[in-house]
Image (cartoon, rainbow, N blue to C red):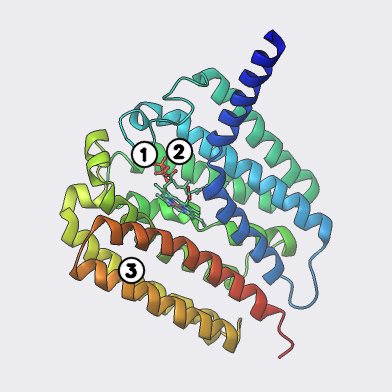
Amino acid sequence: MKTFAFDLTRGNRLRAFYVLTKPRVNTLIVFCAVIGMFLAVPEGLPNAFTVFAATVGIACVAGAAAAMNCLIEQHIDARMTRTRARPLPRGALSTGEALVFATVLGGCGLLVLHQAVNPLTMWLTFATFVGYAVIYTVLLKPRTPQNIVIGGASGAMPPVLGWAAVSGEVSSDALLLFLIIFAWTPPHFWALALYRTADYARAGLPMLPVTHGSEFTRLSVLLYTFILFGVTLLPFATRMSGALYLAVAVALGLQFIRYAWRLYREYSDALARRTFRFSIVYLFALFAALLVDHYLPW
Ligand code: HEM
Ligand SMILES: CC(C)=CCC/C(C)=C/CC/C(C)=C/COP(=O)(O)OP(=O)(O)O
C-alpha cells in the first residue's frame, strides 16, 4: 500500500516536470524546427542521425526555456486563472527542483547539439534560450506592450535552428521562415490576450489589451494578419516554394484575415478564443504545406 502511494507521488512529480516544459507549445516549436531541417536540403532527405540529434537537442533546450520561464514567473502565474495550476504555484515542485531540472535539461540539449550536430546550431539555440527566458521573460514582458513583438524573435527561431542543424549555415530562405513566425506571433498572442485581459491586468502585466484597450488590440491583430499574408507570399515569390504552397498560404491567410476582421467588427470572447485556436492550426498547416510542396516532383 505504501509502495503504491509512493509510486503515485513519483508519477505525479514526473508529470509536474513534464508540464513545466510546456509540451503543447513546444510541439509546434519542434515541428517548425524539423520542417526547417527538411527544407534545408535542396533534394533528397537530410541525414537521419542529424535530424534525430537536432530534434532531441532543440526539444530539450526549448523545454528548459519553458521551465525557466515558469520558474521566473511563478508568482505572476499564481495570480492568473490560466496559469495558477502550474506545478510551481500549486507547490508540486520547489524552485530549487525546477532550477536543477531546467539547467540539466538545457545543458544536455546544448551538449547534444554541440557534439552531434554542430556548434553553430548550439550557439543559435542558446541565444534563443536567452532571448525567451531572459530578454522576453525578465526584461520585456513586465515593461512594454510590445513585449511579444520583440520577444517573438526567439519564438521565430526554430526553423532557423533546424536549417542550421542540417546545412551548417543560415540562408536567406531560412530567414523567410523566421519572418513568417515573427509576423504570426502578434495575432497568435493578442487573440488570447483579448479574452484573458482581466487575468493579465490582475497580474500587473502590460499586455496590449490592458494598456491600449480592446479595439486598438483588435486593429493591431488585423494589421499583423495583413502583414503575415504578405510575408507568406515570399517563399513563392523567391521560388523557394511552388504553387501548392501558394494555394495553401492564400487559403489559410484569407481565413486568418476573416477571423481578424470579424474580431475587429464584432468582438466576443468566444470568437477571440476561436481565432487563437485557428492561429495554431494555421501555423501547423502552413509549415506542413511548405514540406509537402518541397517534395512534389514538379
Ligand atoms: C513571444 C511569443 C509567444 C507568446 C507570448 C505566446 C503565448 C502563448 C500563450 C500565453 C499561450 C497559452 C499557453 C497556455 O495556456 O499554457 C500559447 C499557446 C500556444 N502557443 Fe504560443 N506564444 C508565442 C509564440 C509561440 C510560438 C513561436 C509557437 C510555435 C511555433 C507557439 C505555439 C503555441 C501553441 C501550440 C499553443 C497552444 C498550447 C495548448 O494548446 O495548450 N507560440 N502561446
Ligand atoms: C530554445 C528554444 C527553441 C526556445 C523556444 C522557446 C520559445 C521562444 C517559446 C515561445 C513560446 C512560448 C512558450 C510563449 C509563452 O509565452 P509566455 O511565457 O508569456 O506565456 P505564459 O503566460 O503561458 O507563461
Where residue 136 appears, as percent x and y from the top left, is 41, 44
Going from N to C along the chain, the mark reached first, 3 or 1, is 1
Identify which residue is drawn at 68% across, 41% down: 110
Image mark for residue 224: 3
Q: Marks 2/3: CA distance? A: 25 Å
Where residue 105 appears, as percent x and y from the top left, is 65, 34
Identify which residue is drawn at 72% across, 52% down: 54
In the rendered image, which residue does mark 2 sit on?
134
Q: Mark 1 falls on what kind of element? A: loop
Against 106, residue 250 (above or below) is below
Residue 145 visible to an observer of this rendering? no
Where residue 163 appears, as percent x and y from the top left, is 66, 63
Depth check: give the residue in front, 13 or 1: 1
Amino acid type, residue under disc 2 in the picture: Val
Amino acid type, residue under disc 3 in the picture: Tyr
**Quadrant including the C terminus:** bottom right
Against 216, residue 251 (above or below) is below
